[in-house]
Amino acid sequence: MNKVLSYKPFGEQAILIEWPQYISDQILEDLLRFKEGIQKEKSHFIADYIIGYHSLTLKYKTPILNYTAEVETLKSIYKKDATSKKKPRFLWEIPVCYDLKFGIDLEEMALKSKLSIDEIRSRHAAKTYTVFFLGFLPGFLYLGGLHSDLFFDRKPTPRLKVPRGAVAIGGKQTGVYPCSSPGGWNLLGKTPIQFFDSTKKQPCFAKAGDQIKFKPISLAKFYQLEKEVAENKYTISKTLVHD
């Protein structure tokens, strides 16, 4: 992928690398390939990697003494042949109950979009979403791929409390609240799945590059799965996308 990248100092101990300013699966794959190449050659120098839709911020362990030389090193890593084996990517199937009990904004969304509630539900569940990065809250997945008919502005006044597991739309994005928090996104359903568990080695099951598919379930099935999750008897269905 031949993209013109920009490199900018981000304080004394960080470099911001930016791709063209749009959301793209190709950009994400290019970004992840670059990140993996940097990890392979410079992991002992870098404390953290922060991924955005079209950016990668490298936070170094110590101040960068020669910024120009460091950028040239990064450019050299980027240009290397991308024949190294990609890390596994998974498609995760997430059960979602779109009942009005949880989808408390569905009626308003239907009115604004001139779609029926069932059309909103079906279009939301029909898409396969790409995980671009995690942020905002621990375990909050920023997903790309929302149908353009479902773009809804965030609420002018955020709710003081959105429940954990709420499935929502904000602007051109959809996502799941991993914990109870304030939020201004439009709520259209809820999942019983726990998206963040600090007791686990990998607190969030998904990572950048993975995919998410929402599977509609009934209210009765929701309560059944919620019990299974609480008793640690539920395993999220996943399929290997590519290796």
Image (cartoon, grey):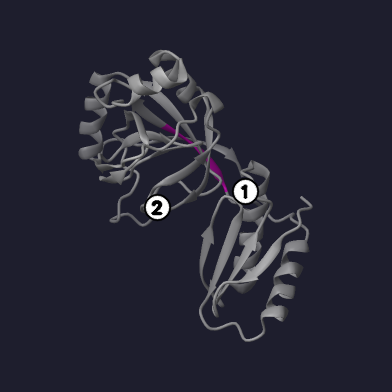
How far from the left and from the top, in percent, is residue 66? 67, 84
Which residue is more in the foreground, 83 or 105?
Answer: 105
Q: Residue 42 at what x, y percent from top left?
A: 61, 73
Tell whether position 58 is magenta: no
188 relative position to 142: left or right: left
- Provide the residue span drawn in magenta: 88-93
Does residue 177 lie above or below 105 as drawn? below
* Vertical placement of residue 239 versus 223, above or below: below
The type of residue carrying mark 2 is: Phe
Name the residue at 33% across, 49% down.
196
Q: Residue at x 53, y 64 (%)?
A: 49
Residue furthest out toward the bottom: 65
Residue highlighted by disc 1: 28
The reply to whether the magenta stretch includes residue 91 is yes
Location of residue 13 with respect to 32 vertically, above or below: below
Residue 173: x and y in percent read 48, 38
Our reading of the magenta stretch's main secondary structure is strand
Q: Which residue shows up at 66% across the image and 59% down it? A: 34
